[in-house]
Image (spheres, rainbow, N blue to C red):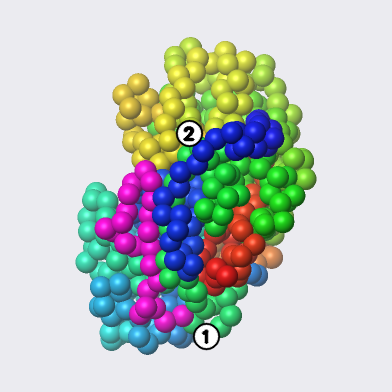
Amino acid sequence: MRPFWIGLAALLCSAVTVPNAQAADKTLRVIAHADLKVLDVTANTTYITNRYGYVVYDTLFAFNSKFEPKPQMVENWSVSADQLTWTFTLRAGLKFHDGAAVTAADCIASLKRWMIRDAMGQNLAVHVAGFEAVDASTFRMLMKTPYALVLEALGKPGTPAYMMPERVANQPLSEQITSSIGSGPFIMKRDEWRPGSKVVYVKNPAYIPRTEAPDYMSGGKVVKIDRLEWVYIPDANTALSALLAGEMDYFELPPLDFIGLFKSNPDIVTLVVDPLGVEQHIRPNSLHPPFNNYKARQALLYLASQEEYNQAVVGNPDLYMKFCGAYFMCGSENETDAGSVKTPNIAKAKALLAEAGYKGEPIVVLQPTDRPPYNAATMVMVEKLREAGVKVDLQAADWSTISIRRNKKDPPDKGGWNLFITGHGGPDAANPASNFWFGSGCEKANAGWACDPELQALMAAWGNEPDAAKRRAMIPAIQMRGYESVPYVPLGQFFQPIAFRKNITGVLVAGMPVYWNVDKK
């Protein structure tokens, strides 16, 4: 890990060029953690695409700070006594960026598309018989069987059901959505979008925020800035220089070795916006050898020393947990260490790889060059794989390119892949139904295509149980099966602060960076 003073030395001897440094006072300039390349929020689960979604779209429900679903675009709702008919009425005056009113038909089409792609949406879809529009602003969701987590599904913060125009949502799933027309608090300026450099949004003058105070992702999304710029600066020292010089206002994902420097600077504020923290993990490709065999995936568990990964990724022990064996986030109500592997064992890993049929063929590992935490963890993983006798084919690319490549199902030697490292956090990761990397629905699963019908059945039973205490008692069995099947390998949990200049106010603890309520003095 590079100590922060090396970055500081580079700052003192390097020049910085950041575009548009003299813009209006109400322009918030954000150092984005990745280059925005994919606009299809139903097809891509990367943080950058999801955060774009929250800028331009809105959702029917949203979580508050107690992780309770609260109405967002919905004005009121009701459910029948038999739990089979849910009725939703939209708030008055909701409009898309092109001026068209948001209708029940738009919401129905958006929900249908989301339920095909999203893990929790798929769980909900099992119970849904269909939808019907009552009038322009009211629709019903008709259930085949009751489902205990309907509102939790509609309000979950990660990869939520964003409401988009019916014509957009009805595009074939084989076609990526390229439209950016939503009904959210900001409008994307397509004429100023420069992939690889900058994304620009402006305040949506037609957006009507809720009257409640903002609380996590719920409440009023009051926009106090005129313009939002995401600037992609892949070199961390250049980004650091821009923030310290006041040319940028907000650093969305600063390298953790910069945090000590920020805390000693009176002009910079650091804030952890996700109180549950972040978990990195190894994602194996379950389609191709050797990781189509569960024993090879189990071998990865015995190569994972969380302390080594956290030292490489975080460094400061105040910012990470010594060990977290929970698939559903330590610190959450679903925390358990059942089935977890606490002690690495290279010999055990070699034996499991041999039992899985591994004979020394190259293992394609995707290396993100512009995401310091992922890159550092990838280097540790490569070292451990080589210690276990694995031949590694390390292929480097920027994170946005990897986020596209990882969706390819081709064999690793034909443009596919075997392993990459990613991360997640917050209430979505803490919930078996919404943890999209844990979902093991085979071809319906997220990239990596984890496939375990037994695990899926356990999670379905969990979601169907209306009693919260009984659901909690089911978690250890779900996790133990997870550690047998290994949809991914947890690498530990840490806390990632954001950083911004002291003249930026109203930054919310919302689980992720959001830009409503933010003001620039």
In-front residue for pair 214/452:
214
Q: Residue at x 56, y 22 (%)?
A: 382
Q: Residues within 10 Å of mark 1 (few under 14, many from 20)?
A: few
Q: Which residue is mark 2?
A: 368
Residue 287 visible, this angle:
yes
Q: Is residue 214 above or below residue 19?
A: below
Q: Residue at x 45, y 19 (%)?
A: 393
| 292 inside magenta stretch | no
Query: Label for residue 451?
Result: none
Image coordinates for residue 30, horizontal then vertical, percent: 50, 55
Q: Residue at x 49, y 67 (%)?
A: 25
Residue 241 as seen in the image, left or right of residue 181: right
Image coordinates for residue 345, horizontal then vertical, percent: 70, 22
> In the rendered structure, which segment of residues is drawn in magenta?
188-209
Identified by mark 2, the residue type is Pro
Identified by mark 1, the residue type is Thr
Which quadrant, please, contains the N terminus? top right
In-front residue for pair 150/507:
507
Q: Is residue 66 above or below residue 113?
A: below
Q: Is residue 338 above or below residue 298?
A: below
Q: Secondary structure at mark 2?
A: strand
Residue 145 in which image quadrant: bottom left
Q: Is residue 434 above or below residue 424?
A: below
Compare marks 1 and 2 and give the one earlier in the sequence: 1
Q: Residues at badges 1 and 2 in contact (C-beta under 8 Å)?
A: no
| 197 inside magenta stretch | yes
Image coordinates for residue 248, horizontal then vertical, percent: 52, 54
Q: Which residue is mark 1?
A: 211
Residue 87 visible, this angle:
no
Q: Residues within 10 Å of mark 2 (few under 14, many from 20)?
A: many
Image coordinates for residue 16, horizontal then vertical, percent: 50, 41
